[in-house]
Image (spheres, grey):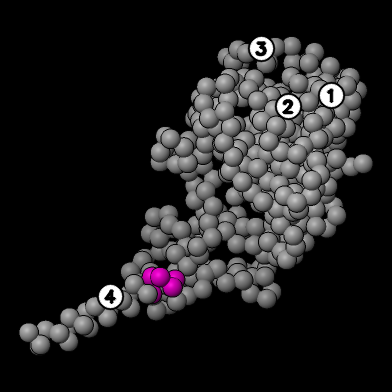
Amino acid sequence: MKKYILPSFMAILALCVNAQQALWGGSQIVSPEIHPDNTVTFRLIAPKAVKVEVIGDFLPTTKAELIEKDGVWEYTTPEPLSPELYSYTMLVDGLKINDPSNVHRIRDVKSVSDVFIIPGERADLYKINDIPHGTVSKIWYNSPTLGMDRRLTVYTPAGYENSGKRYPVLYLLHGMGGDENAWTELGRASQILDNLIAQGKAEPMIVVMPNGNAALQAAPGESSLGFVAPSMQLPKTMEGSFETHFPEVVNFIDKNYRTIKSKKGRAIAGLSMGGFHSLHISKEYPDMFDYVGLFSAAILPGKDVKSPIYDNIEGKIKTQFQKKPALYWIAIGDKDFLYQANKDYRKLLDDNGYKYSYFETPEGHIWKNWRIYLAEFASQLFKK
């Protein structure tokens, strides 16, 4: 029997080495590697691949080819990248994969991308810096209107737990296909608020991020429905249900957090579908929010949608502006597919003499813009 001991031991040792390699990271290459001049190198070990490409929002074209040497494929950006949070994936012989050397990735509806940050300028707001940090919680509440328990993401600023103070609240809404995780994971909302507050550029505030899909309890895979696939085609999104039930969210937050329970202590903002919800919630309840932010917002419901929420829109907007909101803020990219709809909406406001602020950026319907809008909007809220 002894003659079997050494081979068996060596086999077990090999398995342990492989297991430890997996445990401690596996890959021996660095990707992405951010160089001192802010160029970035991407690498992939794929000795049998024929073609490897990187797809990223930092590329001048849709994708770039990696060059192979000794089984390692490599690409370095020809120019330094500007400070920003970037996302990317790889294509190996036409198959889309995530970078196995980068564990930092985010989900946007059904797409999972790797991410990295080029520091400096505005991108420093997206970093976790050595400053006091707020707390992010996942909280369940009951909605009688929707007939279910639902989940919220709630950010409380640094010091909330021990201060005894009351805080204003920003209700921050996601877009189509998103959920209550979107603003913290894709939008870096907690990092942005931490940094702005620490710099004295924003007032300490609570940020409430609800799930705007009124048919769902929570994000895909995080409710009693189990590991359902994310989808853009969800019921009860832009047909009045979410707007109708929204006072339940406000009442729950006011009951369970130390809030300023008045119009002057509340703001609402959202991107795309969330901008649509912000527009219609704020005009439906004109005494609820003093600050309104529309980020690349959809404006009008579909032609076949019937709900009291969307009746007499112009009359309700008139009432809202007669009550003089402290800030009505519209932002959009100049290449956004909703640009014309926002232009038409601004004309309606202009024709009636309604006061609002407008902020335009380059590019389109992308998270890069929405992070910028959050930082700009949050810095204008609740000023005394």
Residue type (three-letter) at the residue carrying disc 1: Leu
| Numbered circle sitting on residue 308 | 3
**Residue 349 numbered tag:** 1
Q: Which residue is painted at 40% across and 60% down in the image?
A: 92
Marks 1, 2: nearer the viewer:
2
Q: Which of marks 3 and 2 is nearer the N terminus?
A: 2
Outermost residue toward the left in this view: 1
Q: Which mark is residue 15?
A: 4
Amino acid tagged 3: Pro
Give SS at disc 1: helix
Q: In whole angstroms, how far apart are the C-alphas of marks 1 and 2?
A: 13 Å
Which stretch appears magenta? 21-25
Q: Are marks 1 and 2 in contact (CB under 8 Å)?
A: no
Real-space CA distance between mark 3 and mark 2, rounded to the nearest whole angstrom: 15 Å
Which quadrant of the view contains residue 12? bottom left
- 335 or 115, nearer to the observer: 115
Residue type for callout 2: Leu
